[in-house]
Amino acid sequence: MPIYSDKVMDHFMNPRNVGEIENPDGIGEVGNPICGDMMTFYIKVKDDRIDDVKFKTFGCGAAIAVSSMVTEMAKGKTLDEVMKFTPELVAGELGGLPKAKFHCSNLGAQALHKAIKNYRDKKKEKEAAST
Amino acid sequence: MRKAYLDNISATALLPEIREAMMPYLGELFGNPSSLHDWGDVAREAVNAARSQVAGLIGASAGEIIFTGSGSESNNLAIKGLALAQQNKGKHILTSAIEHFSVLHSAKTLEKWGFELDSIPVDKYGLVDPDQVKKRIRKDTVLVSVMHANSEVGTIEPIAEIARVTREAGVILHTDAVATVGTIPVNVAELGVDALSLAGNQLYGPKGIAALWVRKGVRVIPLIDGGIQEDGRRAGTENVPAIVGMGKAAEMAAGSIPSRTKRIQKLRNCLLAQLPTVIENLLVTGHPRHRLPGNASFCVRFIEGEAMLMLLNSQGVAVTSGSACTSRALKASHVLIAMGISHEVAQGSILFSFGINNTPEDVDRVLEVLPLVVDRLRQMSPLYSKFIKEGKGGV
């Protein structure tokens, strides 16, 4: 039996939203090469919603599938909604992940949270500068 | 789709002649070799014949062969059994840093039982320096274990030279020769070792059968107690069909190593020479000359091995990887790390192992498919975009 679900294989073989965004509103980087997986997420925000999101990932099949899935889940959602994403939620949408892969590869939600935090920090700085 | 199986270190195809030799023992010749009737006699004769065939392949005598259930069991028996047999003499053992886990973890178990361990380092090619062994031998050292060749990077170790060091010091030397027996000529007298593990793995024989050769006069404490099978060194009813298969495999290998090597090496050399011309930032791992004939191992920069393996599999190409993500323990290959390769680079590990059933078309298929796979994953890799932007971190 293959170790990955059909859903994981689909997102690994045909990943959605791979790439970078020029002048992104927020960037989130997680992971390190010692653990094996690294993800960089780029977001564009419009009316407090994820208008566009792209990713680049160095890692195994699960890491790539998680990245792809979480971008699909996030598009069009409000930032607060995305901040509620959990690794469990992403894994569930993928039809489950092998136990061993759950912690190391399931960093998509965390990467998005970082990108949103980066966007919010930048926004705060701008507001502070203009007052 | 054309399939290319290039993972012969994980499993080799059972040769039809070997399967045929085994079949009667899965059928009407089902006797127990310990029984004293006709059924038993037939089984006993078959096991004895296989023992001679296996001994013949490595220049040993039949009485020195202990059949076991796997290469891992042979290594467990060697490390634990040889160390325990000499614990009154001392409790210090040495292993190289790149041994198979069945050696390293057996040594760890001995540590829990009061032994002291030391690790022998390797150079960037994975070679053990015999002087490094000499430096670490103490008065209480009772066992040294260095593998004959490392299946992951293919490096062949200078066992005969290491044996001169251990013999001079009066220390027992074990070598894990699972990767070499049947692949390159192996002769226990020429190597000068005291114990040697081998398995059906590289012999195109069945799984679940292996052997430990122990020089006559060297004591080994059994791991499995019970009856007096294998001269009291491994209890349990013999796996007669598998033993017969391993015997046949040994006999077939004995006459064909030079022709097998020639054929396999030609294909391997082709891949080793050509892959770096179609993929940039590719590191060849292992020794350029002292290398198993079927091994072509690389680290592809900026991408990860499991993803490569899966995309290759979708194109019908079967390989393996030493990346952290591929291992169940989620740790990068200890072999690559011991050779001084960084965790990041080790993540891109990919290993092709050729066997006698491979053809030039298999090499062509890899050369056709792998550059596309690598390109696809690099386009997704944040490390690669960083490299392109900054021009740093290549090899």
Image: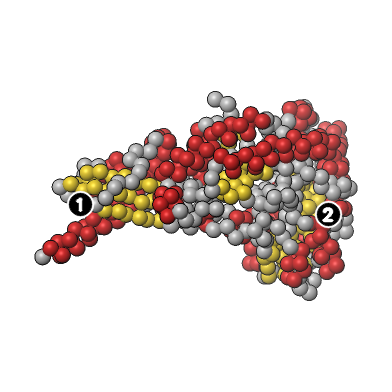
Residue placed most toward the observer, B103 or B158: B158
| Residue sitting at x 45%, y 39% | B376
- Residue A97 makes an appearance in the image: no
On screen, residue B183 versus residue B353, left or right, reads: right
Callouts 1 and 2 in the same chain: no
Dot 2 corresponds to which residue?
B191
Q: Is residue B320 above or below residue B356?
A: below
Report the disc number at residue B290.
Answer: none
Quarter-of-image position of residue A131:
bottom left
Q: x and y percent of residue B235 in the render? A: 76, 49
| Residue sitting at x 30%, y 46% | A21
Q: Is residue A35 above or below residue B69?
A: below
Q: x and y percent of residue B175 in the render? A: 76, 55
On screen, residue B222 versus residue B57, left or right, reads: left
On screen, residue A87 versus residue B252, left or right, reads: left
Q: x and y percent of residue B342 in the render? A: 54, 58
Do callouts 1 and 2 mark residues in contact (Cβ within 8 Å)?
no
- Residue B215 makes an appearance in the image: yes
Tag 1's secondary structure? helix
Dot 1 corresponds to which residue?
A80
| Residue sitting at x 75%, y 46% | B180
Residue placed most toward the observer, B232 or B189: B189
